[in-house]
Image (tube, rainbow, N blue to C red):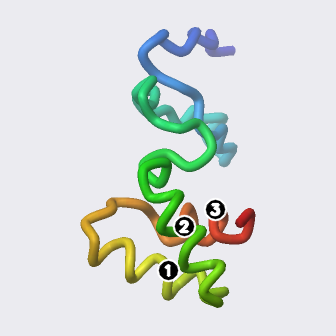
Amino acid sequence: METILPVPQHLELVQLVADSRGITAVVRPKAEQSRCPCCGCLSSRVPYIYQRWNGGCRNGSQMHRELVEQGVHAALRTVTRYHALS
């Protein structure tokens, strides 16, 4: 039986993956404290997102394309999830 080691403080546990070899922990560096916990780099674009929503844009993929053109580095899933909350 293998020992389970604690996750170092500078990393966060993302996922546990089980396969025939056992369980593997997927970790990543913790997010910077300045990032918004619910939407990451989108926090600076909130006014724009609400403006587009109020203007009738209900397509998360379209919103993602527009934000990428503005230099935002956010995943489509993140934008779509945030857009759905608007």
In the image, 67: left or right of 52? left
| Position of the N terminus by quadrant | top right
Q: For the residue labelled by badge 2, is the local secondary structure a helix, a strand or a loop?
A: helix
Q: Which mark is residue 25?
A: none
Labels 2 & 3 near each other (Cβ < 8 A): yes
Q: Residues within 10 Å of mark 2 (few under 14, many from 20)?
A: many
Identify the residue under disc 2.
79
Q: Between marks 2 and 3, how big is the CA–CA gap?
A: 5 Å
- First reached walking from the N terminus: tag 1 or tag 2: 1
| Position of the C terminus by quadrant | bottom right
> Which residue is at the front of the view, 76 or 21?
76
Identify the residue under disc 1.
63
Q: Between marks 1 and 3, how big is the CA–CA gap?
A: 10 Å
Labels 1 & 2 near each other (Cβ < 8 A): yes
Q: Amino acid at mark 2?
A: Val
> Residue at coordinates 49% horizontally, 45% vertically from top-left?
40
Q: Position of residue 85 (x, y in %)?
A: 74, 63
Identify the residue under disc 3.
82
Q: Across the whole image, how many numbered discs are drawn on residues?
A: 3
Q: Position of residue 35 (x, y in %)?
A: 45, 35
Q: For the residue labelled by badge 3, is the local secondary structure a helix, a strand or a loop?
A: helix
Q: Residues within 10 Å of mark 3 (few under 14, many from 20)?
A: some
Pick out the residue farthest to the right: 85
Q: Position of residue 58 (x, y in %)?
A: 66, 86
> Residue at coordinates 25% horizontally, 66% vertically from top-left?
71
Residue 40, relative to residue 23: is it above or below?
A: below
Q: Amino acid at mark 1?
A: Met
- First reached walking from the N terminus: tag 1 or tag 3: 1
Q: Between marks 1 and 2, how big is the CA–CA gap?
A: 7 Å
> Which residue is at the front of the view, 20 or 45?
45
